[in-house]
Image: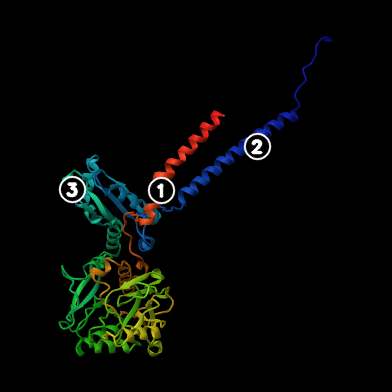
């Protein structure tokens, strides 16, 4: 009909274009969602953690991290901690770091014995737990071990009589947990022979090396007392022996046993007391190119404008060329008491395939005094000026038959010698942590446990501030004058603006 008008139809090309735009938008949304899921999945599996806290209370030591990397099986840790235990949060935070460093090798289950009674009873029966104390149970390939809360912290309860709660003075969770893990993974403890019979420090309670003994035993190592007078040969189960500060020389028979042990790929840690006369023991070292000199290391310290004080305590640094001291390189240690110098002659042992390495050297300013009993200050000062720039070695390592490449494991004889025997005593190691680290590294190297050489876990220290008179005076001005003055000035400015 003439009066009818036809509605224009939308071109088919525009409709197709809209469909394409819709598909493009849908594809973009799907792609964005896919990328978001992938990024979150990668971030969940691969991420890094940093500890910016002051004391880094939960930061794991290098030794623990390397040990966790060496674990091949699965470690299951069950936490039986009640909420009122003072270190509950500390233990949980620390185990989170273990779980992260273990990279899937550690499973953790939290069981509150006061709330989940059925699960707690089931696991108590399984692991034969008979104590009500908060604890951890570590399970590795069918073997299990418990770590009690009392082993992980030193708690001061002296304030409870005054209504105060228990106070944690030292958190030792990493030491206790890593030690228990070593026991489970390694199984049998490594035996370390401790030579007696020449007035060495005793291992018993009340001795002078109890801190060192406890520290070494926490690394899955047990001490075994050894008197060379009572044996025909050093037992085969002793791969390494320790000799600390003998006051009397070894007999010919004892030296024969010592040489036979060395020739059969034995390992020896020898700490010499310079004041003791041990010519046979010194001759044994001299055969391999290590000479213990008859001198004492000293240094003059300035205590005033024109005042000098003589010290025989040696401030030394660790060299980083050996696996023993690689992770102590640059750190300083204090060697209390008398210390003599060591002269190394590498050429003497090279023909017998013996490698010598210096481990510890005195800081600059120390000199080796042969007339160490004199009281003549003028002579000592003259000797100090003449010899204070000479590098002085006080610790060395020797290896016979080994490989210069650390990646190659070869059976060999090993020996570590230090010309000081008092730096490991209780009154010294409590002031200087590096002594424990150095002896631990030496023992682990002797036992071919290089992966466990590292710096000992740190103990938290309280934050303290010390203000001298000038600082107190400045603080007084800030508190009494400047702090009240700032709001006064601001108020005055605002009042003036409103007034205008």
Figure check: 353 above or below 6: below
Tell me the number on the disc at residue 24.
2
Tell me the number on the disc at residue 477.
1
Residue at image coords 54%, 29%: 498
Residue at mark 1 to residue at mark 2: CA–CA distance: 68 Å
Residue 183 in which image quadrant: bottom left
Residue at image coords 42%, 44%: 481
Q: Is mark 3 on a helix, strand or loop?
A: loop
Residue at mark 3 to residue at mark 2: CA–CA distance: 65 Å
Q: What element carries label 2?
A: helix
Q: Do callouts 3 and 2 mark residues in contact (Cβ within 8 Å)?
A: no
On the image, the x and y values in percent for residue 10 come to 75, 24
Q: Do callouts 1 and 3 mark residues in contact (Cβ within 8 Å)?
A: no
Residue at the extreme right: 2
On the image, the x and y values in percent for residue 361 come to 37, 78
Q: What element carries label 1?
A: helix
On the image, the x and y values in percent for residue 336 come to 28, 74
Figure check: 417 above or below 102: below
On the image, the x and y values in percent for residue 462 come to 31, 54
Residue wearing tag 3: 132
Tell me the number on the disc at residue 298.
none
Figure check: 498 above or below 241: above
Residue 235 in which image quadrant: bottom left
Look at discs 3 and 2 and give the one toward the viewer: 3
Instruction: Return the residue nearer the eye: 414 or 309.
Output: 309
């Amino acid at each position: 009909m003439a009066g009818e008008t036809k509605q224009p139809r939308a071109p088919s090309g525009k409709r197709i274009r809209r469909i394409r735009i819709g598909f493009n938008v849908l594809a973009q949304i799907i792609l964005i969602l896919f990328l978001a899921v992938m990024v979150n999945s990668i971030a969940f599996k691969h991420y890094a953690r940093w500890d910016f806290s002051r004391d880094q209370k939960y930061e794991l030591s290098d030794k623990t991290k390397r040990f966790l990397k060496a674990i091949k099986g699965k470690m299951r840790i069950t936490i039986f901690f009640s909420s009122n235990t003072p270190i509950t949060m500390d233990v949980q935070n620390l185990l989170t770091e273990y779980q992260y460093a273990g990279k899937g090798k550690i499973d953790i289950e939290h069981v509150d014995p006061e709330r989940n009674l059925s699960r707690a009873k089931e696991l108590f029966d399984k692991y034969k737990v008979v104590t009500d104390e908060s604890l951890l149970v570590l399970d590795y390939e069918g073997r299990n071990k418990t770590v009690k809360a009392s082993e992980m912290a030193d708690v001061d309860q002296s304030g409870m009589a005054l209504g105060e709660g228990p106070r944690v003075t030292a958190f030792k969770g990493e030491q206790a947990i890593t030690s228990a893990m070593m026991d489970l993974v390694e199984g049998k403890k490594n035996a370390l022979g401790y030579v007696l019979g020449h007035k060495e420090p005793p291992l018993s309670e009340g001795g002078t090396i109890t801190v060192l003994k406890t520290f070494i035993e926490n690394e899955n190592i047990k001490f075994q007392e050894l008197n060379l007078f009572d044996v025909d040969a050093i037992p085969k189960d002793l791969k390494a022996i320790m000799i600390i500060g003998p006051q009397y020389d070894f007999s010919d028979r004892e030296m024969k046993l010592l040489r036979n042990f060395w020739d059969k790929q034995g390992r020896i840690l020898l700490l010499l007391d310079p004041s003791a006369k041990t010519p046979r023991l010194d001759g044994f070292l001299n055969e391999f190119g290590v000479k213990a000199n008859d001198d004492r290391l000293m240094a003059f310290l300035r205590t005033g404008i024109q005042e000098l004080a003589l010290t025989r305590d040696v401030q030394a640094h660790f060299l980083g060329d050996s696996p023993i001291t690689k992770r102590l390189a640059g750190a300083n240690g204090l060697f209390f008491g008398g210390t003599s110098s060591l002269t190394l002659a590498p050429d003497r042992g090279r023909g017998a395939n013996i490698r010598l390495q210096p481990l510890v050297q005195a800081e600059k300013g120390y000199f080796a005094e042969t007339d160490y009993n004199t009281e003549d200050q003028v002579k000592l000062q003259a000797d100090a000026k003449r010899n204070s720039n000479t590098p002085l070695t006080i610790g060395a390592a020797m290896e016979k038959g080994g490989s210069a490449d650390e990646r190659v494991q070869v059976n060999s004889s090993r020996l570590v010698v230090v010309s000081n025997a008092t730096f490991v005593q209780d009154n010294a190691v409590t002031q200087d942590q590096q002594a424990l680290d150095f002896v631990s590294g030496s023992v682990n190297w002797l036992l071919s446990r290089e992966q466990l050489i590292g710096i000992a876990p740190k103990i938290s220290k309280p934050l303290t501030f010390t203000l001298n008179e000038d600082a107190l005076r400045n603080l007084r001005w800030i508190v009494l004058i400047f702090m009240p003055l700032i709001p006064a000035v601001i108020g005055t400015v605002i009042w003036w603006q409103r007034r205008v």
